[in-house]
Each structure stands twice: as structure tokens, then as C-alpha cells.
Amino acid sequence: MDSKEESDMKLIQHQYGKARVRVLKVTRRGQQHSLKELDVSVALQGNFTASYTRADNRLVVATDSMKNTVNVLAKQKLGSENEKFGLALGQHFLKTYPHVRRVEIGLSEHCWERISAGGKPHAHSFVEKGAAKPFVKTICTRTENSIESGIEDLLILKSTGSGFEKFLRDEFTILPETSDRIFATKLKAIWTFAKAPKSYSATNAKILNAMLATFAKNFSPSVQVTLFQMGGAALKAAPEISKIHLAMPNKHCLLINLAPFGLENKHELFVPTDEPHGQIEGTVAR
């Protein structure tokens, strides 16, 4: 590319940072230990255009420095609530670098729970809690901060209490209607805080419990209806949040045909499938 071609182009958006910074913090209170394991990402926006267009690195914050910042602040500030740690990181970068205008921090937690030994939770031995990951995204600018919290990869299933009927049919529709089916989904939910709660952890737990109770108790005529009901339950449970986005891929469980073997399968034996799956998403707000 010659200088004339370069002069006809401009950089219209950019950000950069460090991803997959892994931190495991052990907090010791005598013999009692607790764990916090996070996967952290940092993305900066600001006056970095020259580093892209003129090979000028004078304002570039090395991504290795970002990693070191995460580690040092984890030592100093990481506690039980990830949201507060995300804010501390974002505000640190804004305070330290005047040419940075926006900082996005992503925090995904790998959860542990205590191993039961002799009927009691052990003080310093843990087992993986499950595949579901709580996460936080904080965005800090010179004028405002925003916090989103959520959960992803939460596999939930109800073995009845779900159906799918009276849907549009055309020449390519072969799916039979049903008033009784397995409903399984790997839930991802993201909620936006309009104001800080007294406790992020307690509020997040209330939101999740309200959604799961709705999933369990209400008959589901479609994933769409259940998504809307779960979103409404979250908003009702936590007045501190303004909206919630849910993604609920429909993990189909297909009835196995046992007729060739002279057996009747009365909704007992299924093959779980991941692909292809229905992808149902929606945002519910006040």
C-alpha cells in the first residue's frame, strides 16, 4: 500500500487490552480458607490512534502492564464481590492514564465449594461447583460507570411441564406438536444495575433463585414464554436492576425409537443433543 492509499483511509474504531488473565486468590482466616478464581479481561479505548497509523507507541500501555495491574489489585482489593473489583480496576486505569477514556473489564468466575468431610464442610479442601460461571462486566468512563452481572453455561432441565403446540406450519414442517416434552437449556443471563445494591452477591442470588423457581413451577408452552416470565421474575426480585437479557438455547432431548426391538418407549428414554439447537434470546426491561 503506497502513501496515497494510506492517506485515503482512517481508523474509525479501536480498542486493545489483555485477555485470559487468570487469578486464584486464597484468603486465609486461621485454618479456614476461601477461594476466588477469576478469568479477567481488560480493554482500553482512548488516544491510541497513532499506535495504529504512525507506529507511535509513546501512549501505549503494554498489555503485560495490564496483567500486572490485575495481579496487584487482586492482592489489594479482590474480595467476595466481583463487581467491586471490576470497578476498582476500571477506575485505576482511568486515574493512572489521562489519555484513556473508556475501560471495559470482564470477570468470569470458576466456582468452588467445600468438600464435605465427616459431615462438615472442610476448612481448606474444595471441589468444582459446576460448569456454570458467574460473570461481571464493568465499563468505566470519565463521566459514568456501568455494571452488568450474570450467569452463563447454567444447564437446567425439567422432565415435564413443557409443550409446543399450534405453531406455524408450512411445506417444510414435520415437527409434531406436543403437550409434554423435556425442556432443557443452557442459560445465559445478563442483568444491568441501575443502582448499587447493599450486596451484589445477595442480589445476584435473589435474581437467579427467582428465575429458577419460575422455570420450575410454570408450565412452559414455549421457550419464548418462559424466557419472558423468567426475566419478569428477575426484575421483580431485584428493583436495583433495570433490564435483563436472556439467551436460552433449546437443548433437544429426542425420544429413542425402540419399536424395532419390540419395546414401547413411553417418554422414558431419550438421546440428548446439542446441535443443531433452537436459539431463543430476549431482553426484558421495566
Image (spheres, helix red, strand yellow):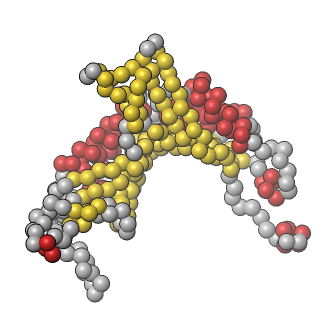
Q: Residue furthest front?
A: 261
User: Looking at the image, is 230 positioned above or below residue 202?
Assistant: below
Q: Quadrant of residue 13?
A: bottom right
Between 259 and 56, the one nearer to me in the picture: 259
Residue at 39 percent across and 56 percent down: it is: 247
- Specify whether 285 is left or right of 110: left
Q: Is residue 64 visible in this depiction of the protein?
A: yes
Q: Is residue 250 visible in this depiction of the protein?
A: no
- The spot of residue 159 in percent (x, y) is 19, 55
Between 271 and 56, the one nearer to me in the picture: 271
Between 7 and 56, the one nearer to me in the picture: 56
- Specify whether 167 is left or right of 127: left
Number of numbered discs on residues: 0
Q: Residue furthest bottom?
A: 171
Residue at 37 percent across and 31 percent down: it is: 113
User: Looking at the image, is 152 positioned above or below residue 259?
Assistant: above
Residue at 22 percent across and 53 percent down: it is: 158
Q: Residue furthest top?
A: 30
Residue at 88 percent across and 72 percent down: it is: 2
- The spot of residue 276 in percent (x, y) is 37, 68
- The spot of residue 141 in percent (x, y) is 63, 42
- Specify whether 16 is left or right of 118: right
- Specify whether 142 is left or right of 29: right
- The spot of residue 149 in percent (x, y) is 45, 42
Q: Quadrant of residue 264?
A: bottom left
Q: Quadrant of residue 227?
A: bottom left
Q: Quadrant of the N terminus?
A: bottom right
